[in-house]
Image (cartoon, rainbow, N blue to C red):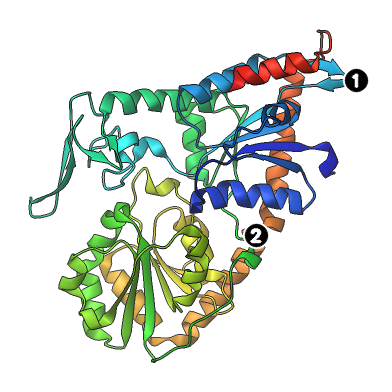
Amino acid sequence: MASNFYVWTLNLGKRTACSYYRIEVPMTQLAALDYANIFEENGEQRKDSNIALMYSDVAHFYAAGGEPFLHKFQTLRKIKPAVREGNDIYPPAIIYDVDDNNDFVHPFNTVFAKLGVRGYPDARFLKPGEGLEIIDSTGKQIGGWVDGETFYENVTFDVARNLHQMKVRHELIRTAHGVTVTSPTLARYMRDVVGARDVYVFPNTIVPEHFENIRAVRTDDSVRILWQGGMSHWIDWYPLRDALKTVAQKYPNVKFVIFGEWFNWIHENIPDTMVEHHPWVGYDAYKLKRGLLNIDINLCPLIKNAFNVCKSGIKMYEASIWEEPEVTLAERTPPYSEEIVDGENGFLYGTPAEFVEKLSALIEGAPLRKRVATAAKKWVLDNRTPKATIPGLFDFYTEVRAKQRRELGRPIIKKPTLDQIKKVGVALR
């Protein structure tokens, strides 16, 4: 099977959770399960990359953006089928893959500098020259962006540029033959708002053997509760500050494990002796570090907004995969409300009071934690591992490829020479 299907993929930059779940996992597992041969372009400008691209069935682009990619997509769409050595040769079908709704990036997300286009909390489109202030419940300003001035990691916030790049991104998505996303909500947005042609939900996929079953030796009998995330999750985490204070006062045997961004308000609500902070690590060390945290309860607060509802439930998947799985308590919003059955493979809460109620039950009930965590692990193994997700992805690739070939029709031009193919490759750079 694999000898007859070829996938070219672009994988630039350092290894991250995004590149791992959206490029590395699907490509390596398509090959491991004998569905496809994979050619990876990693930015080294290999001489054979454009030739491999031209001879592939599918060209896979994760979160591509900008005019150079649009030019590449449009060039690929213009190429006509040909005949070489008696075989029909078609340009590849273009697959655009994305795992977030980047049209609604929250201003607390650091990528707002290069992607932000909407105000907060009204989510209206900003106009060039406009900025925004973020205030807390007391009216105090706690953040903001000034058009043309505020910058992050050498990128200056520019409303006009960001709006233009959003339009380019939409055109890229419409130009692609198929789009793959992580959630049904994001799929609907791509179809109904952006105008994507064919959209398929390929969920983030867990490869169990990639997770080391190494646990640190317990030094006490505390119940370890995890929250992990970056600055963009401030809006999800902050509404629970009083609830967390209540839990901390009620259960002195709890240890709150903070993995990632540290917020000063934590000091004000939880005694320092009950908090354990772990800064981010590079992704190559992430899964090992995550396992060594020895977590009992995994918290996934996620308020309902246009960006969050398009996310995947990856934090629940990762919590469930260990030899001793962790139970997840998540906010009752997509994606978690679409995959967690409350009380069966996880728990859901809708208010801070319900959060305290359910977290209290989990702290007090070790058998309850074990039962629900075990069910969550079974659900992940049944629904979010390669044997469950890769066949559907391959079927989508073959369907998109077949549709593209039908639309192009049979070759009507003379077979190209190798020099002609190389010239096309130059145009694609």
Q: For mark 2, what is the residue? A: 385
Residue 196 position within the rendered picture, expressed as x and y whole percent measured from the top left: 54, 28
Residue 265 location, quadrant: bottom left
Callout 1 amino acid: Glu
Q: Is residue 279 left or right of residue 79?
A: left
Of the residues under marks 1 and 2, which one precedes in the sequence? 1
- Percent across and percent down for residue 51 are 72, 27
Please give the residue where the numbered disc 1 appears in the rendered image. Answer: 85
Q: Residue at x 29, y 74 (%)?
A: 356
Structural crowding at the residue carrying mark 2, measured as other residues with C-alpha within 10 Å and reported as few (<14), some (14–19) or many (≥20)? some
Residue 392 showing in the rendered view: yes
Q: Secondary structure at mark 1?
A: loop
> Secondary structure under badge 2?
loop
Q: Residue at x 48, y 30 (%)?
A: 192
Query: Could you tell me which residue is drawn at 84 percent across and 20 percent down?
Result: 88
- Residue 338 position, x and y percent, is 49, 55
Local packing at callout 1 (Cα closer than 10 Å; few below 14, some 14-19, many 20+) is: few
Counting from the top left corner in percent of width and height, residue 200 is at 60, 40
Name, please, the residue furthest toward the left: 139
Pair 1/2: label in front: 1
Amino acid type of the residue that numbered disc 2 sits on in the rendered structure:
Thr
User: How many marks on residues?
Assistant: 2
Residue 200 numbered tag: none
- Depth order, front residue of 69/153: 153
The quarter of the rendered structure image containing the N terminus is top right
Viewport quadrant of the C terminus? top right
Q: Residue furthest bottom?
A: 220
Up-down: is 170 above or below 375? Answer: above
Foreground of the two, 115 or 335: 115
Relative vertical location of residue 132 with respect to residue 360 in this rendering, above or below: above
- Which picture quadrant has residue 276? bottom left
Q: Cα distance, mark 1 to mark 2?
A: 40 Å
